[in-house]
Image (tube, rainbow, N blue to C red):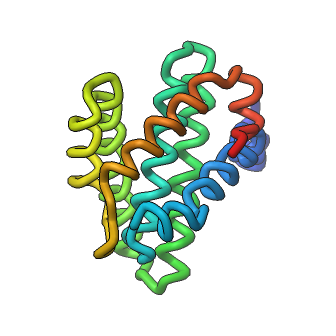
Amino acid sequence: MSFLSRLFTKRDAGRDALRPLWHRTVAIAREPRWYADYGVADTVAGRFDAITLVLSLVLLRMEREEAMIEPSIRLTELFVDDMDGQLREAGVGDLSVGKKVGRLMSVLGGRLGAIREALPQSEAALVEVIERNVSLDENGNASRVASEVRRLAAEIDSLSSARLLAGDIPR
């Protein structure tokens, strides 16, 4: 591949196939039940928490299969692109966007590890992760969030790779 063809090749071609999965992940995280029924704070922080929670469950499913590792990287890149765009839209200056996105990636990685560790353990372990990692409002119920997380994880885990990649997560 020549220098010019590499320069002008569409960079996100590998991501395009994953956009339906990314959009479905965000749609699940934006479902009103997270906020109205379970008490996730309906704030910027709470919505970010819900997105990283659902995305973590999807990524955990993807890491089980070798063939899903590359798509999981592309899905994470879509998350980064979206967060970058959200920060810029919110008026964060160009010079600090990269640093803030780096912090958001660190948060995602921490939550992914905590959920990976807690899911196979007791309900109390998952509740503790929710209490530490999800912004709840005054009516928030970490136990109900944990139950929904466990249910959603089982639903995502039961999907074939093809259905997951297509964003076909029923709700």
Please state if 157 lies on the left or on the right of 35 as rendered: right
Q: How many marks?
A: 0
Q: Quadrant of residue 155?
A: top right
Q: Residue at x 56, y 15 (%)?
A: 65
Q: In this picture, is 61 found above or below 137? A: above
Q: Quadrant of residue 114?
A: top left
Judging depth in this view, the residue of 104 and 28 nearest the camera is 28
Quarter of the N terminus within the rendering: top right
Judging depth in this view, the residue of 37 and 6 nearest the camera is 37
Q: Residue at x 53, y 26 (%)?
A: 61
Q: In this picture, is 92 found above or below 156? A: below
Judging depth in this view, the residue of 41 and 19 nearest the camera is 41
Q: In this picture, is 56 found above or below 24? A: above
Please state if 143 lies on the left or on the right of 44 as rendered: left
Q: Residue at x 68, y 46 (%)?
A: 171
Can residue 6 be spotted in the picture? no
Q: Quadrant of residue 71?
A: top right
Can residue 73 be spotted in the picture? yes
Judging depth in this view, the residue of 42 and 71 nearest the camera is 42
- Residue extending farthest to the bottom is 91
Residue 157 x, y percent position in the rendering: 57, 25
Please state if 82 lies on the left or on the right of 169 as rendered: left
Residue 159 x, y percent position in the rendering: 67, 25
Residue 150 x, y percent position in the rendering: 44, 36
Q: Residue at x 50, y 33 (%)?
A: 153
Q: In this picture, is 48 found above or below 116? A: below
